[in-house]
Every structure is written in C-alpha cells, then in structure tokens.
Amino acid sequence: MSVFSPATRDRFERLAASYPQPRSALVPMLLYAQDELGYLPPEAIAEIAALLGETELGVREVIGYYSMLRTAPAGRYHVQVCTNISCMLRGGEEILAHCQRRLGIHNRQTTPDGMFSIEEVECIGACAWAPALQVNYDFHQELDPAKVDEILEKYRRQG
Amino acid sequence: MAERPAYPAAHPAEVRVVSQRFGDPRAATLAGYLDTGGYQALGKALGLNGGEAMAPEAIIEEVKKSSLRGRGGAGFPTGLKWSFIPKGGDKPKYVLCNADESEPGTCKDRLILEHDPFAIIEGITIAGRAIGAQRGFIYIRGEYRYVLDIMQRALAEAYAAGYLGANIRGSGFSFDILAHTGAGAYECGEESALMESLEGKRGIPRLKPPFPALSGLYGCPTVINNVETLASVPPIILRGGDWFLNIGLPKNGGPRLFSLSGQVRNRGVYELPLGFPLRRLIEEIGGGVLGGGLKAVVPGGSSTPIFTAEEALGLNLDYDSVGKAGSFLGSGGVVVINDRTCMVRFALRVMQFYRHESCGWCVPCREGTNWLQLALTRFHRGDGRPEDVDLFTDVAQNILGRTLCPLGDAAAMPILSIVRKFRSEFEDHLHGRPCPFAAESSAVPVA
Amino acid sequence: MPETPSKPAPAAGAPPAPAEVHFTVNGHTLAAAPGTLLIEACRAANIEIPSFCYYPKLSLQAACRMCLVEVEKIPKLQTACTTVVAEGMVVHTETPTVQAARKSAIEFILTNHPLDCPVCDAGGECELQDMTFRYGAAVSRFDEPKRHRDEQQWSPVVYYDRPRCILCYRCVRVCGEGMDVWALGVGNRGILSTILPNHQDHLECEECGMCIDICPVGALTSGAYRYQTRPWEMQHVGAICAFCGDGCKTTLGVRNGVILRGDNRDKNGINGDFLCVKGRYGTDFTRHPERLKSPLVRDASGELRPVSWAYALETITDRWRGIQAAHGQFGVIGSTRCTNEESYQLQKLARRVLGTNHVDHHRSADFPALFDALAQPAGAAARPLPQLADSGALKTAKAVLLVGGDPTQEHPLLAWNLRWAHRLAGASLYVLNRRDIRLRRQARRMALLTHGTEADAVRYLAAPQRGDPPQAELTAVSPPGDKRWPQTPPSTPQPIPGGLEEFRAELAQERDVIIVFGPELTGDAVQALVRFGASLPGHTRYIAMADNANSRGAADMGLYPDLLPGYLPVSDGAARAHFAAAWGGDIPAAPGWNQRQMVEAVDRRELDALYVVGANPFRLDPVNAATLKSCFLVVQDLFLTETAQAADVVLPALSLYEKSGTVTNTCGEVQSQRRGGSFEGAKTDLEIIHALARMLGADFGRPDADRVFSEIRAQVKGYAVSLVQLMAGRGALAVPLNSAVPHQAAPQMIRPNHDSLFTAGTLGRYSATLNAVMEKHSRP
Ligand SMILES: Cc1cc2nc3c(=O)[nH]c(=O)nc-3n(C[C@H](O)[C@H](O)[C@H](O)COP(=O)(O)O)c2cc1C
Ligand code: SF4
Ligand code: FES
C-alpha cells in the first residue's frame, strides 16, 4: 500500500524517469511528498527509498540536510518569517514577535488546533520588499503588524 | 494567494536588458515572448531565420567579446568558462542554471524567472549549443514554488512549439531542459554542492580539481551559470558582444541587476550599467536613507565585506572598483544601513545565517560559525569582555581561507570588516553598558 | 560571492607522465610516483603531517583541515590529504602559518568536545589527545555553553557519543567503502551534523566494530569493553584469532591474565586494518562462567567429580595401559583450534604411543584433494609456482574466481580482501554459486546456479563438451551505488541460454586468476577445478576455504587416518620410515578409521578408548549412550560440550589465546603467537599430551612450542618456513605439495559448519557478546 495518492505516485514515477539517474528526483520527491502529507513519516521515507532503490538511511541523510524537509508535522499553515538582514532592517524581528504573540506560540511550535506553526527562516529572496514571510509557499511582503493580522485571519477563515 | 513583487517602472538611469520585459504581461506566454523579440537570438545562433547558423565557437567568441561576467557571485568571465568545456568526447555535457538565489540581500533572479522565463530558456539553449550539450537543468530554490510553476509552464510551451526537444525548429540541434526544485539550503547555490544536490544527495561541495568543466554533473563536463548571466546571453547574441560591452566598462560588460534593500526609501531591483556610482543608487534612485543618516552599505550580498558611509559614497559599482576597495560586487545585493542600527546586532544576524547554512563539512566553518554566533550573542546581550573583540577577528581569521568551499570565507569576511570598521560600536557594548541602540528598534517600518 | 573560478582543463596531448616526480618539502628533495598524495609522500619521508579525516585507502574528505600546508605559488594553504605531488612543487609544513592553522583546527574541534577524557574509553589511545598535546594550545578561548546530547546505544556492541564526535567520517567510509555495509550516514547539517545509524536509533549491520576501531576519538565505543579498564593498565599481546580459518591477528588487551578485549591496535597482521565481529568481541569466551577449572572424573555413581590433575592423568593412563595390554582399539580426534604443535604431537601420541591410525579431525575443506590435484606429475612440465595464494595476494589479484562458499559470512577477511581488490585494484571477480551471496555486488559476473551444484558446474567448466551444462543465470554487478544491506534484492537475473558457457568464455580471457573455493567442492570436483585452472592463461593460484582457526593446520599436521604430517600416505613405507626414524618408534601401516567410522565402531563396541582433544564430534556423529559405556572416553576441552558430558575423564584445557605456538590459516599462512591470557586450573593441550606420553613411557621432551615447531620445520613437508618472517609477526606460506596424495576420498566427511558472522561452531556459543549480537539479529 502506498502512503501517497495515485497522482503523486504517478508523478514520482515520471519524475524518476525524467533524469539521467533516478536518484536525482529524490529532493523534489521528498518535497512533494511533504506537500501531500504535511511531513515525512517513516512510511513515506521507506516508500521513496524503495522507489529509487536507495536505503532509508540514504534518504534520511538527505532529509536532515535540507531545511525545508521535516520528519514531524507542522501546522496546516506554516508561517515562515524572515529575519535576515534586509528584513531585520525593516522590522522582520518585530513581525516574528508579532506572529508569536498573535498565535500564542513560539518559534518552531504549532498551535494546539494544528492550524498554524511558526518558523524563523533565513533570507527568502524578498529583500527589496521586506519584511516578508511565507505561509507554506505563498509570499507576503512589505508587512506591518496590521497586515500580518489580516493575512493570518484570512488563512484562519480558510480553515 | 501568492503576492507578486511589484513591477517597477524603469528609472531613467536604468538600462534595461535582462529586465526589458519586467512588467510586460506578454512575456508570460511564448507567443508574447516572440512578439517582444524573443527567440531572435536562438534563431540567429541556429540559423533559423534564413541566415547561416553560428558555429559554437562563434557563440563563445561573442560572449567573450561582451565581457559578460558571472552574476551569481564570483564574477568569472562567462565566455572563458564556456571555453573550458572540452570539445567532443563521448560523455554528455550539461548546462546548469543556478536559480538557488539565497544570498541575503539578493532578490533579482526571482524577478527574471517570474517576468521573463523564456529568456532564461533561450539563454540556456544557446549556452547548450555553444558547449555541445544536449541537456540543461534549472535548479530553483525550494521556497520559490510559484517560480517553479511558472518555469514549468514556460518549458511545456517551449516544448510544444518545438523550441525545446528533438531537432529544435528543424535546426538539427536537440536540447532538453528540466526545472528542478531544491528544498532549503543556501550552500546548494555553490556550484559543486548544487551538482551533488541535483544528483539527489546532501549538498556537500566537492573537492576541486576536478573542475565542473571536466567533471561536473554525473561526472560529465558541465557549465553552471547564474540566472541573470544566462538571461544576458540572448541580447548579447542578438545585438553583439560589443554592444553589451559598451554599456558597461572594459572587462565589466553590460548592465546588471542590483537588488537595493534595507533602510532606503525606494527599494527595488534596478538594472544599471556597471560602474554606476553607488551614491546615485542610494540617493537618486533609492531616494535616500530612511530613518537616519547613512552608516554602512553591503555592496554585493551578505557575504561581501561592508563599506562605511564614507567609503560607499565614493564607490562605483563595477567588479574592479569594488574589488580594489576591498570587497566584491558578489550577487549585486546592495543593503543600506542607517546610523541607528547596531552593527554588533547586524554582525550577529549575519553570523546566525552562516551558522545555519554551513553544510558542516569543514571543521573551521562548522565550529567557527557556531562559536562566533554564540560569542556575539553573549556580547550583544551585554556580557562581553574586552578581549572578545579581538577574539571575533581571530576566530574569523582562522576560518578565512581554510575551508573547502567559499562559504567559510563568506562567513568570515563580513565580521572581519565590521569589527575593523565599527570597532568603537563593539567597545560601546562593554563594561555592562547596554546596547546603545537597544532602546528602540532601528528597524524602519514599511509605511 | 567571491570564490575561485573554475580552472581550465589541462591541455590535451600533454607529454606522458614521468615515472617519478620530484618536489621539495621543508628544503628536502623528495621523489614519489605520479599521483601520490602529498600527505603520503611526506609520511613516507618521516615528515609528519597531522590529520583526522584522512585515512589511507578510503575516499578523500578534506574536512578536518588539520593537514593544511603551504605550497609555494598558491596563496591559500592546501590540504596535504588531497594535494597530488607535482614536479617542482615546493612545500612547507612547519611555517608559523601552518602551525597556527593546526592549532586553530584543534581549537575549533575542541570547542564542542566535552573534554571528558578521564572517563572516556579512548583516553590514552585517542588521536585528538595526541594532536592536542602536540599541536594544540594549552588553554581554550572558547567560553560558550557546549551542546550536550545523550549517549546512544546503537547495538549490543556499538555506542555513539555525539559530543565527542569530530565528524571525520571515517566510520561512515569504512562501513560503506570497506565493509560494503553502508550502515552509517550523516544526518542534519552544519553544527547539528551527526552520525546516523541505518535504522533510526539502532544499527542493523555486521557488527564488525570497524567503525569503533577507526574512530580517532571516543565517539564510538565498544559495548564489550567500555568502562572496564584504562588502556595503559593492560598488556597488549598479539594473538591469532581463535575463530575462523582466515587467521587475523588480533591484539589482546590483558589485565591480570584476563583478556578484556580483542582489537586491531597494531594493524600489522596479515589482516591489516581488518577485524570482524568474532575477532574483536568473541574473546570473552575465555571468561565464560562455565569454563572448566578442574579435571573431572566420572565416579561410581556416574557423576563427573572434580579431581586433581595427578589423579585424572593417572586414571587415564591406567585405563589406557590396560587397553594396550588387551590389544584394544584406540581412537583419537584432534582439534581445528589447537596449535600446529599440539596437533602434530597428538597424532604422534596416537600413532607412535597408542599405536593407532584411527586419527581424524572435523574436516571442512578437501585439502588432500587440492594438493593431490596440484601435484606435479612425474616428468610433466613444471607449473608455475607457487600454486597456492596467500590471503594478501587477493588484494592485488587481477582476477578472482570464487566457487561456492560465502566469504562475507564465513571468511570475513577473504571477503574484505576481495572487496579491496575490487575497489582499489580494479580486479574482476567471478562468482559461481547456488546462493545469491553478497559478494555478487563486487562481481563482474555471477553465475547463479538454478539447477545443479557447484561441483557439476566446475566439471562442466573443465570439460564443456560432455553433457548438458548445469543451468545458471548470469548476473552482472549490481547497479553502482547500491548500498542496501544485508542484501540487494535479487536484481531479476537475466537467464542466459548456455549461461555457463559465456561465463567460461569470459573467464578464459583473464590472466593470473586466483581461484577460491568452498566446501561444496570435494574429491574429483577439486580435480576438475584444477584442470580448469590449468587451462587458464597465466599463473593460476588456489585458496581452499576451511572453517576454523587451525583447520588447515590440523590437516597439514596429519590428523587423518590415512595421511601422515605433510599429506604423506601412511600406507607408504618410505613415509612411515621417515617418521618412525624421527619419532623413534614404529607406526602402524594400515589406514585407520575416520571420525564417523570411529563412532560407528563405538556402536559396534569395537573401539575401546577414544581421546577427543578440543573437538565436539558427537554433535555431528551422535553416539549411542549404551554402547559408549564400553568405550573409555577422555575429552580435553574448555567447556562441558555434548561430547565432554559423555566422557569418563574431562581435562580442562587452555584456549588458543592462552598458549604459544603456531597456527596455519586456510590459505596456508603460518603465524606464530605468544601466550596472552591465563586461566587458573587449566593446562595447554601440549602440556597434557606430553604428560600423557611421558606417563606411557614415551619422552616427547619439554612441552615447549618452539621446540616442537623446530621438529615440524624439519619433518613436515612445506613447513620449512622463514622463522624471521614468523618472528616479525607476518604469515609465512606453507606449501605442503607432494608428488601425489592418494587419499581415501570421503566427501561425506567434509562437513562445514556454515557459520555466520556471529556463530563459530561450538566455541561461539560461549561468547556472551556474540550471543547478545546474535539475539539482536534474530529478533524480528
Ligand atoms: C555558498 C555559496 C552560495 C552560492 N549561491 C549562489 C546562488 O544562489 N546563485 C548563484 O547564481 N550563484 C551562487 N553561488 C555562486 C556559484 O557557485 C557559481 O559561482 C555561479 O553559479 C556561477 O555562475 P556565474 O558565473 O554566472 O555567476 C554561490 C556560491 C557559494 C560559495
Ligand atoms: S566551508 Fe562551510 S559550507 Fe563550505 S564545505 Fe566547508 S563546512 Fe561546508
Ligand atoms: S586530513 Fe586533510 S583535511 Fe582532514
């Protein structure tokens, strides 16, 4: 039994076939697997390892290296606040503090309802539009606390 | 609900080459791209428009003539890099487009990828033709998911119209491109770490030699270039190397994108001729410093040594001038810092980044960045000791030049320059004195 | 981002590389072969270059930055571990800059090191301690909190202490590249990097302990040794491993006569860097609580009771004299774990004192068949010599044919050497087996037999025109980079019609093949193998794989009913005369019974006395308890084995680790060792045999192994090996080849144990550590 949806399974197979060596598909596969499952549980690791003919250890080595990949669940909306220099100079740390206050959780924690989690992240390439954050893959830029509240509220309503 | 960066109108001082289609919605589709002069360069290179096809050597020659230098960080002459690829041989060859853009202060490749995806595809294809490759990869940082989507749509369109794949537009030349996502690792922007990552491994840089031109991706000859570098190629081929060279300075051909960020009024990404005065960028284009006077400027992304206000205001933005002044043009990330900013805090934030991003392979980089981050944290908190200031320099000096890849240097150089140039600020933190800037945040609000 | 740009490729058509390059280090001109690493070239010239991550023959890392040196014309310091020497290169290894770089590398490493040397097992044998002493600073400037992580137990024998780990990745490489197990990896990134075991929180592996051995610090420690002693409180005695037939040298750590560990401290044996789980951890059988401490004699009530040595020996000799007087039959079964000296003296006792040829041992390879096949037929053109390969020859072999056996499980050193040849010398390995053994991953070609036996296949290779070939599927090497353990799932082998024919044709292209074969080949199959080997071009050599530490020695020393020492037939008058003269007494001419025939004779009440030394024959040939009553059974052993439980007299013997003498590994490499541990109450087999002989009126002289070995060198064909070589701790190849070895073919008597990595016949049962490891591995 696969832990992935048939579409994802299918995508994985196409992905592995599209490189000169199937292992090249590993990082994208892990990211897409995480997109679907929210994190990378042991069964997902085992399945991907088997798909590529790699060891689970080899897959875990890779997961540990990349900061976007995780082996434990995060919130449905993973709020990633950049505090690197360009954001810091424009209030990125205040935005982080504001998010923590609003959601009642600290960095790397998840709200009890599993809706939000917060992570302080390194530069996300929004320097000229700082301060910025990403919720999952969505960029939100030129933030101030009020705008953050609006954004969080929108996600909360979305459920 | 992704928000797109704003499409800035061109500033009069800008020379728009790679940014020529920014804000032009037509560039999103192949038809629109063709309408706006797209694929003329590839047509010229492959002889699709009735003319004679250019020999691969002639393409390289044109790029050499343009004096195009890498926009990713090191500023290596692009034509020369291409010419290192051995002719012939039975191994496949690869072109890699480095779209990992992770250098703090840099947000320009994202705009090209977003606003002009076909230009990148065209540039990679021309590069492939020049070095005899049949395959290219675009390595896009994992956070840029919407960019990956844009790129994949563009690739599909290019394939459908015969601009990619077997026998491109009947030219006899075949070329494939795949867009690939990373998953969060600054180090994967380093060329050999990127290749490891693209092979599905941890992004640990490789020993060199062998160099990528001989043994790169899958052990095959490989050219790796930055997004902006490759996007510069079609205009160069179309309008000639001389044209491009003459926009900039000798050995500093063309304009390039500068990401202007920090405490400056009009932040944004501007395409300026190389040699453009930094003072004009900050004052004229940037509209001046926000929240105070100018204290310091980072010229080329967080890893480049910092300039004081005085140094910065006399500086011209080209590879050689910035180099002579003791720093690098790097990735073109200009970060403006006002005089209410604590430089200890700034140094600490930079070190936090390198500690987080060190791949951990080399002892000096792994342990040194950790040590500096811990010591700077303590120091900034007010628990500094007089000898700490020299310790910072010493530890950084012990990282510098002693690591496998340049990330170690990238971590060491900023702190070395900050301590040297802003020593008094460090001393102001001593003897239990609180951070002089701590009372209020120096951060300038957006509004 | 500044960085060094890519450099141009060296010009094509460059002049051919010279045989030697010349360069200067610290003002001395040195020469080395092109391609030599600077660190190796310097070390060869006694110029010290410190390193942590560099390890000879493993892939290069350039991670620790300890080996930085100055190379003129290059602005940055260079890592000597990755720099290849070049003509005219000028190197400085002791400038202030270099010294400062080393000092700072040590300082960096120590920033997160717990400095718990007083309680660390590696204290006193720690490279970090040594380097800090030599190159480091006296005080640390690092004043920040260190990261703590709890120690982790990954297996019964492997513990990992992350804070002590310096991330040199040697363990990862030796496990992967060296062992082909790939059970260790690197997790996380940057300062959080850590070594990972393959199953999240524990290891599933061969438990070889190579990772512990190669760890330069105390990050990986041995569950079998930790916290027992300090290294400087032990004597370190070189010994030959008591387990398999490969004969690895292990260094025993002995305190107050107790063997506390086995390891590979000196790395100067035939096994180089290698030691397997048994050699490393199995030594604890010497401390097993059931170890026999006193002779036992069965009393009137039928119980075995402790008695004095004098009483036990008198009981034995009284009974034996009685049986001699009544012209009764004696049987003697010797050991595959005793020394050559003991085996030699035991068969001498049997033949010359007890007057019997009913002598045997537990056989696991058909050595007589091999030596018979290799015999130079009178008048034939001489084949190139030597025809036997030593274990080291495998490392440099160009091609190897492996028939039968499973070296990974049964002969770990041979497997290590085969992988070495594959990895570092590019050897072609051909595997012929019924089972999909793990060495397939190194094989250029594997013939996986689907029908028929290895013997059938070999007969076909030798004479393809006759009959249908046994069915085989040919598989090539597994895909490169396949790191799955324990075994790659069968990669759907491609059946090839007449597959063996193709296998044969490919092999026929190889020169100088070494043929290694397992117990599947006996008698005429061995003859066929040698015929095939002789048809190959170049110089073919052979290795037969036998189970135990001195299986080969037992065979060489004549523990056969029909063969005298050196494979001379007992039926041959001249051979008998030779030994009769040497031993001062007659030898019976008729070949005796083998082990099974002796047990059958017990059942027929035809055997009156059976003397079993260091063997457990009733495990394989169960005896009838009722008829055994009429046979006087003496067993000499470490433990009360199945056989010893049935004995009338049991004599406690010392183990191989507790005695001096020589042993011969399965390839024929003779090695000498000195007594390591001691054990109160037991005696060496040599002492016991000599005492029994003396009490029966034959003087075997002082029970001194050196004296007996002199006799062996003089009397046993092939054993006139170099003493210098032995004393230097190296193996000396014994080549006991005669004109022919007429031998009672008894293929049914070749009964290998099929030991796994974690078992070793009867002996292995008494190692607590091996049992713990095995128990873990048998858990689902
Ligand atoms: C730590 C590190 C990170 C880097 N990150 C990037 C990056 O994100 N994008 C990029 O184009 N180049 C990056 N580079 C530079 C690349 O290694 C390489 O020089 C570049 O892709 C070459 O392209 P160019 O010659 O067109 O500049 C990085 C280098 C280092 C050492
Ligand atoms: S310098 Fe840092 S990032 Fe680069 S290889 Fe060494 S440890 Fe990794
Ligand atoms: S020994 Fe050269 S870097 Fe470690």
Image (tube, rainbow, N blue to C red):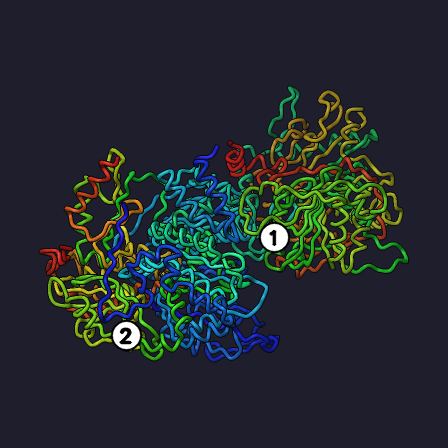
Q: Classify mark 2 as within 8 Å of ligand 1 or not, answering yes or no.
A: no
- Residue depicted at 46% across the width and 60% down the height: C61
Q: Is residue A117 left or right of residue C677?
A: left
SS at badge 2: helix
Quarter of the N terminus of chain C within the rendering? bottom left
For the question of whether residue C436 can be seen, the reply is: yes
Q: Nearer the viewer, residue B74 or B433?
A: B74
Asked where in the image residue B334 lies, by quadrant, the reply is bottom left
User: Residue C4, percent across and down?
Assistant: 40, 70
Amino acid residing under circle 2: Val
Whereabouts is ligand 3, in terms of quadrant?
Answer: bottom left
Q: Nearer the viewer, mark 2 or mark 1?
A: 2
Q: Is residue C780 left or right of residue C495?
A: left
Amino acid residing under circle 1: Arg
- Residue ID for mark 2: B322
* C162 versus B66 height, above or below: above
* B328 versus C485 height, above or below: below
Query: Which residue is the extreme one toward the right?
Result: C379
Asked where in the image residue B105 lies, by quadrant, the reply is bottom left
User: Residue C73, percent across and down?
Assistant: 43, 78
For the question of whether residue B432 can be seen, the reply is: no
* B101 versus A147 height, above or below: below
- Residue depicted at 22% across the width and 37% down the height: A156
Q: Is residue B108 left or right of residue C506?
A: left
- Residue ID for mark 1: C419
Chain that bears disc 1: C
For marks 2 and 1, give the CA distance: 54 Å
- Residue depicted at 30% across the width and 75% down the height: B323
User: Residue C382, percent across and down?
Assistant: 84, 60
SS at badge 1: helix
Q: Residues within 10 Å of mark 1 (few under 14, many from 20)?
A: many
